[in-house]
Image: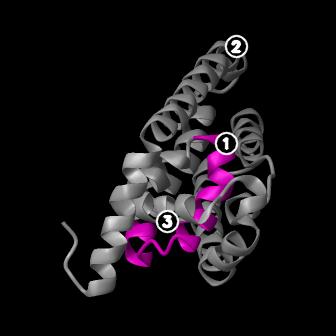
């Protein structure tokens, strides 16, 4: 829950070690471990969303330039969250660095809460429940598999993040113009295209 609120803590390690403990000792029920992980992930993201919604955008406007978040980039972020926020929330759950910040960013970018809740819940169930049950059923095999699979997943994550940054850098001007046009239409009360 604390990691999903925005604190950089090792939630995956906790879920995996708890599931391995369940598999090795049978002193804990894996179903309850998975439920606790899923509920913690979903609740934490909802708290993170609220923090981002209440404090995030003002802080980004005030101090964002210090980390290259210009007003145009903030508008671009808001536009991308309005267009692709559900995908960002769902898939962000599976990328360690993004998982810590996605709820805060969703709140700061005013993503509709009902949309956030749906994709957050689906991502939390898939991520926390998936890790818990897969680790439990793989048992001791996870130690042999986790090295190569972890490296492969890490490479895929780096490629996806790198591709996303490359895409945004290459298309930043066009996307910013689209975001500004959408903001102008919204200001005039027109329906989004």
- From the top left corner, tell me how far across and down residue 122 is, in percent: 42, 56
* Labels 3 and 2: the sequence-earlier one: 3
Residue that mark 2 sits on: 144
Answer with mark 3 or mark 1, whichever residue precedes in sequence. Answer: 3
Residue drawn at point x = 27 percent, y = 85 percent = 188
- Quarter of image, res 33: bottom right
- Which-is-in-front pick, marks 3 and 1? 3
Q: Nearer the viewer, residue 63 or 112?
A: 63
The N terminus lies in quadrant: bottom right
Q: Is residue 187 left or right of residue 117?
A: left
Quarter of the figure with residue 107: bottom right
Q: Is residue 121 left or right of residue 155?
A: left
Q: Tell me what residue is drawn at x 65 percent, y 64 percent.
A: 40
In the drawing, does residue 188 fall left or right of residue 82?
Answer: left
Mark 1 lies on a secondary structure that is helix
- Disc 2 is placed on an element classified as helix
What residue appears at the point 76 percent right and 40 percent down from the top-left corner? 13
Q: Can residue 39 be seen at all in this image of the molecule?
A: no
Measured as percent of width and height from the top left, residue 27 is found at 76, 47
Above or below for 120 versus 50 = above
Q: Nearer the viewer, mark 3 or mark 2?
A: 3
SS of the residue under disc 3: helix
Task: Name the image quarter holding residue 105.
Answer: bottom right
Quarter of the image with the C terminus in it = bottom left
Q: How is the image coloured?
A: one colour
**How crowded is the residue under tag 1: few (<14 C-alpha within 10 Å), some, or many (20+)?**
some
Q: Which residue is mark 3?
A: 75
Q: Earlier in the sequence, mark 2 or mark 1?
A: 1
Q: Which residues are magenta?
A: 95-118
The dot on residue 96 is: 1
The CA span between labels 3 and 1 is: 25 Å
């Amino acid at each position: 829950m604390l990691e999903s609120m925005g604190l950089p803590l090792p939630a995956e390690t906790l879920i995996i070690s708890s599931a391995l403990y369940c598999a090795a000792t049978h002193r804990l029920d894996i179903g309850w471990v998975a439920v606790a992980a899923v509920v913690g992930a979903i609740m934490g993201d909802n708290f993170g969303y609220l923090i981002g919604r209440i404090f995030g955008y003002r802080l980004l406007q005030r101090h964002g330039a210090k980390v290259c978040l210009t007003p145009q980039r903030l508008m671009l972020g808001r536009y991308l969250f309005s267009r692709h926020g559900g995908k960002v929330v769902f898939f962000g759950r599976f990328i360690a660095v993004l998982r810590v910040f996605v709820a805060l960013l969703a709140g700061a970018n005013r993503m509709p809460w009902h949309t956030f809740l749906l994709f957050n819940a689906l991502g939390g169930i898939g991520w926390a429940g998936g890790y818990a049950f897969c680790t439990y059923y793989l048992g001791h095999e996870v130690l042999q598999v986790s090295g190569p699979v972890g490296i492969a997943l890490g490479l895929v994550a780096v490629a996806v993040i790198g591709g996303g940054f490359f895409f945004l850098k290459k298309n930043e001007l066009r996307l910013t113009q689209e975001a500004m046009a959408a903001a102008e239409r919204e200001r005039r009360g027109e329906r989004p295209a």
